[in-house]
Each structure stands twice: as structure tokens, then as C-alpha cells.
Amino acid sequence: MNKKKKNKEKLKAKKAKGANYIELKDAIRRLFGDNPGKDFSLRQVIRQTGVRDQKSKEAVKEILFEMERQDKLATARNGNFISTREEEHLEGRVDHVNPKFGYVIVPGRESDIWIKTDDLKGAIDGDEVRVRITKSSQNSRRDEGEVIEIIARGREEIVGRIDISEKFAFVIADNRKYHFDIFVYPEKIKGAEQNDKVIVKIKKWQDQKTKNPVGEVIKILGKAGENEAEIHSIMAEFDLPFEFREDVTEAAKRISEKIPEKEIKKRKDLRKVTTFTIDPADAKDFDDALSLRTLENGNIEVGVHIADVSHYVKPGTILDKEAIHRATSVYLVDRTIPMLPENLSNKLCSLRPEEEKLTFSAIFELNSAAEIVSEWFGRTIIYSDRRFTYEEAQERIESNSGDFHEEINLLNSLSKKIKKRRFQNGAINFETVEVKFKLDDDGKPLGVIPKVRKDAHKLIEEFMLLANKRVAEFVCKLPKRSSDGKNTFVYRVHESPDPEKLESFSKFAKQFGHDFNMDKGGVSSSLNKLIDNIQGKPEQNVLESLAVRAMAKARYTTDIKGHFGLAFEHYAHFTSPIRRYPDVMVHRLLEHYLEGGKSPDKEIYDEHSAHSSDREKRAAEAERASIKYKQVEYMSMVEAKVFDGIVTGVTEWGIYVEITETKCEGMVRMVDMDDDYYDYDEKNYRVIGQRNKRIITLGDPVKVTVEKTDIERRTIDLKFDFDK
């Protein structure tokens, strides 16, 4: 071997050794980095890194001493090596997504912490926990961790179905994120019978023998599958109140219906101005009314009159405390869980026809182009001449006849001009399809009916949006009355969407054959173009729902952050104080500023805003659960037939399909697809048959039959009908 060749081989060997040394050093760094607080001996480090030859073992020793000199490692009391990095403890809430693992959501942290179920240490979904990072992730999106302390249990009462045997019973939780059954001793079932829906209180979180929580039945809701039992189960699952406490109801009943003359004198008297309400046919509480009159200069005065709840519900009273606690009314498929007792929500505050009512009003003078010439905000008294349902108002728009048809058509014309400007300014035209149910006297669904929004609905919506927007702008533009240069107010904010979520949505849209290019005209313009293109198409509901999910969640706050979806710089909720507590706060603050008051401390408003946002989220989840329950119940009763559907999701465990006729979503399980073995193509949202090469992808029109329904789990199992 010549000298040149020898040098080449030496260089090659040196490079190889250097590479191995670097890899070994990285492995040791990872070992200590993934195990903060844990010490290792030299022998343990060698074993963990998997080295065997003597040179590598010497290299391990050298690396450990080097890291010690650099203060990256220290010597523990037992002589072992230990990382000097302080262990990071974080606090968050458990989201137990499946039996094998869950996440801990830490407020303010970009990514959640992935945790194996065994490392949750008995914590369940919704618990507040303290965690430590066990594996920092550079390449993947999430760190891994383990629970070191359960700070607070999310709940101690769980709803489910009881399964009774001779010597014991188990309660199978309704909540699919509870991956355990609750053990109940026979003497603790309190008279419950097989398959009853019950509420069980946890007495011991983990029994040493069964490894299950131990509980006792505290309430029997009824037989599983019956309407009352299932709806009560949903109410219990989401911790919704079944009724008002007696002292709260009595406090509401003690309020006099008579309006004192001195109160009337404090207000603008609008009782002689034409006024009416437009609401759903089954509505009982009427938050808002519209008035209309032509001024001498030819302009139109439109009044948006809102129930003056803050006149009756005073701060610090028992009614106020209950309203704060509930924060919102909840609308389940067959009932309303109101924020305020009936004497207030359906009587005193409800703007019923042919009754004088106290209101808080936003009054606008509009020219023929529906532009605001002047505006006024303040307390009023009104008299509603007529109560219209949406259908009755729509009839007057379409026929141009009937009582008050001129007023309704004029309002409709003005609202369309306001709406046109709103979209020109960048508002997004979300029109998600909602469903309602035709129920019999026992609550059984006789039909699923998509809700259709017509001009009458949009008319009301535009004037409510206008009032909400202008109230927020009015307060924001007032002379600043606080040391920080801001006037405390409760805003409804909707921040710009996450670019990553929009990118994912864009990929979804392409699977349906639609282009969503954010670079062409911006997000709002691109979304509106897409929404226009999918109107009336099978994928409309799916894509609009996905678009809404891609958006940030609207919330309440005292910070001015604007409303992306509406394209408003300032926006508040002013128009529904009977059913939303933030609107009550807005009324109080607006009145305070109108009377010249200084800006109050914002801390309590921040607290109530955050609580209201949480309660709103809970209400939406409960409403969705009740709709899903009725959809499953309805599909369990329909005749066996083939349904048209559209593929709305593709996962490794199944294919989600929305049935076009009923808007119900079910799943075809991969294990049930027995015509072939299908490979999952995650990148392209599709599955491919190995033999028949059949491709099923997101957005495909398909034919399905209903195989099984599970009312308790609120799931529908479907099967493809490839022969049709």
C-alpha cells in the first residue's frame, strides 16, 4: 500500500471515529435530557447507549467528564452522574383522547404535551394536573411527559348506564373520553335497576384490586334509551342545572310587573312608534324588537330595542349571582335551560306584544343608502304592536302584502344595503347548515329538517350586528376615563385564523375539487369565493363546517382585538341580555359611561368574560350532543334503505360519511369492509383496495346503509353499498 493510499485510509478511519463520537455524545445528551432528576452510573450509561467495544466505553467516560466540566452534569450523592438542568413543571388540563394516550393542554403553550395513559397516574379527562417533560421533541410537534400531581379533579360526579351483576355493579360512563368503568358495591346502587341511566359520585379514584374508580349512585335518571333519561344524561354530563334553586325563583317572583311612573319619566318614550318583534315560532323569550318611522327630512329612523335586563337584575343580588354562574341559556333539542328564571325571561323582560316594556335602545337615522346620519343610545320604554314569526315576516317580504308589510319590506331593503357594505369590507359569508327535529309528545324524532335561513332571518341579523358594532365603537371613541387610556368594556373578539389550520383546510377543499388560494385576494375573499362556489352542492355542509373549525374561536374579553369573521374593528354583544350575561355587562357599562362615569377596574370584567366564554363552549357542546342523540335515535327508526352520502373524513380506523337526506354523520369501520383489505393513504385522505384497487377519498359521493346505532354512545355504524 503506497503512502498516499495509507493517508487516505487513516483519514477515512478518523472521520468514522469522529462521526461515532458525535453520535455517542448526542445519545448521552438525550439520555440525561429525557430523564431530568434521574442519576446514572457509568455502567448504566454504557448499557443505555448500547456500546460494547472498549474504545466506545472509554469514549463514554470521556464524554461524561467533559459534560461535568461544562456544568451540564453533576455528581450525585451516590457518585452517579445527574443532569444540572432544572426539571420543568407545567400545569394544564387533561384531554384523554383515547385509551392509550392523552394530552395535557397548557394555557399559553403552542403545543400540547403527549402522555401515555399509564403515565397519567390516575388523572382523567378534564382534570387539572402538574406534569414534567420526560422527552423534549425537536423534530415532532409535541413534547412527551408524565403527570406528577393531580391538582384538581374536573368532576366527581359521572353519568352513565349501570350494569348490575349478583355481587357488584359497574357504571359505564357516557363520556367517551372516560376510558374506565366505575365499580359500585351492591349496597350503593340506591335502587337502580339494570340499564338505568344514573349519576354516580366517585368515592375512591383507584381501587387496588379492580384498578377502577369506586363510586355510589346518587341519582337515577331513568331507563337508557328513553328521551327524558338521555336528555337528563346530557345535562348531567355537561354539568347543566336541572332547575333553579327555590330562593332564586322566589327572588324573580317578588319583582313587580308594574312600571313606576317615575321610571318612565327617566326614559325616552317610544310607545307610539311602530314596533314589532320577529322570532322563531317556538320562541318564548323575545330579547329584541325593531321600530321604524319616516322623519321629516325623508330619512328613516330604525330603533333596535333590547330587553332592559339590567334594570331588574342588579349587581350583587342573588339573581345576578345565578346569572353569572350560568352565563348563558342552553338550547337542547327539546328544551331550553334558561339563564334567568321564567318570571324574568318569559314575562317581565320578554318584549311581548301589546305590552309596555323597559328597553335599552340603539336608534339610528339612516338615509336612502342605509348610511348612518346620526345615532342615539339610551334607556327607553316601548310598546310592541305585533309579534311576527320568521315565517310570517318572510310571507310579507315575498307577497308584499299583509299587516306591516311596508315596514318589513323597507327594513329588508335597508338591511341588504348594510349587508352588502359589510361584505365589501371583508366579512365572511358563513352559512352553515343546521338541523331541527319534528318531535312527538314523547320526544321521539319524527323527522330531521335542515334549517333554512331566508331574508326575514337575515334582516334581523343585520340590525343586531349593526347595534352591536356601533355600541362597541361608541364606547371605544369616548374620551378616555382611566389611567391606562382605555375605557373598560366587554368585547366579542374573533382573532385571525391560524395559518396552519387554513393550510390544512385548503388541502381538504382541494380533495373536493375546490381551489382555496389565500394568496389571491386574502383569506376573506378566498373563503367567500369558495362558499359561493359550493352553494347547493353535496359538500356544502362539510366544507362550511370545516371552514368554521379552521377559524379561531370567538370569545369575550376586555381587550380590543376586532372580529375577523365580521370584519369589524370593534364589536360587542348588546342584543341578547335575557340569554347571555356578557350582554348584561355591556348594558351596565354603556349606561355607566352615558352617565359620565369613569372607567371601572377591568379585573372583574375579565374574570366574568373568561367564565362566559367557557360556559358558551360548554353550552355548544351540550347542544351538539343533544342533536347527535336525536340524529342517532332517528336513524335507528328509519326504514332499511340505501342512503346517498358524502365522505367527510378518512382515518385509519374508519370512513366518516354524512347522509345527504338527514345531515347525520356515521362511520364505516375499516374492519367491517369485507370486500377487500384497504390501505390507508393518510397524505391523500383516502383508502385503496389491495385487490380491487377501489379508491375511496374525501368528498366522494357514496351509497350507504345503516348497520347499527348506539344511542348511549351517539354513534351510527354504516356500510357501503357498492352495488347501487
Image: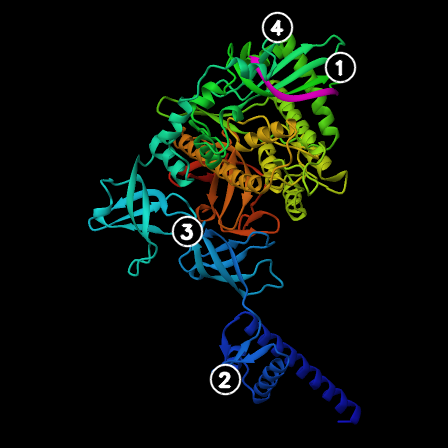
Q: Please say if 29 is above or below 232.
A: below
Q: Position of residue 306 (x, y in %)?
A: 57, 21
Mark seen at residue 79: 2
Q: Secondary structure at mark 1?
A: loop
Q: Earlier in the sequence, mark 3 or mark 2?
A: 2
Mark 2–mark 4 Cα distance, whole angstroms, equals 94 Å
Q: Is residue 36 depicted above or below 222 in this figure?
A: below
Crowdedness of circle 4 by 10 Å Cα count: few (<14), some, many (20+)?
Answer: few
Q: Disc number at residue 167?
A: none
The tag earlier along the polypeptide, 2 or 1, is 2
| SS under mark 4 | loop
Q: Residue furthest top?
A: 402
User: In the figure, residue 575 lies in which quadrant?
Assistant: top right
Predominant SS of the magenta segment:
strand
Is 591 above or below relative to 687? Answer: above
Q: Is residue 390 visible?
A: no
Q: Residues within 10 Å of mark 3 (few under 14, many from 20)?
A: some
Magenta span: 371-383
Instruction: Look at mark 3 in the image and give the residue it sits on.
Output: 153
Question: Which residue type does callout 2 highlight?
Answer: Gly
Give the answer, above or below, for where 5 lies relative to 459. below
Asked if the residue under mark 1 is in contact with the one under mark 4, i.e. CB atoms within 8 Å, the reply is no
Left or right: where 596 falls relative to 231: right
Q: Earlier in the sequence, mark 4 or mark 1?
A: 1
Residue 174, percent across and down? Answer: 38, 43
Residue for badge 4: 401
Can see residue 354? Answer: yes
Q: Who is closer to the viewer here, 199 or 515?
A: 199
Residue 673 vs residue 596, the one in the foreground: 596
Q: Which quadrant would residue 401 be assigned to in this image?
A: top right
Mark 2 to mark 1 CA distance (whole Å): 87 Å
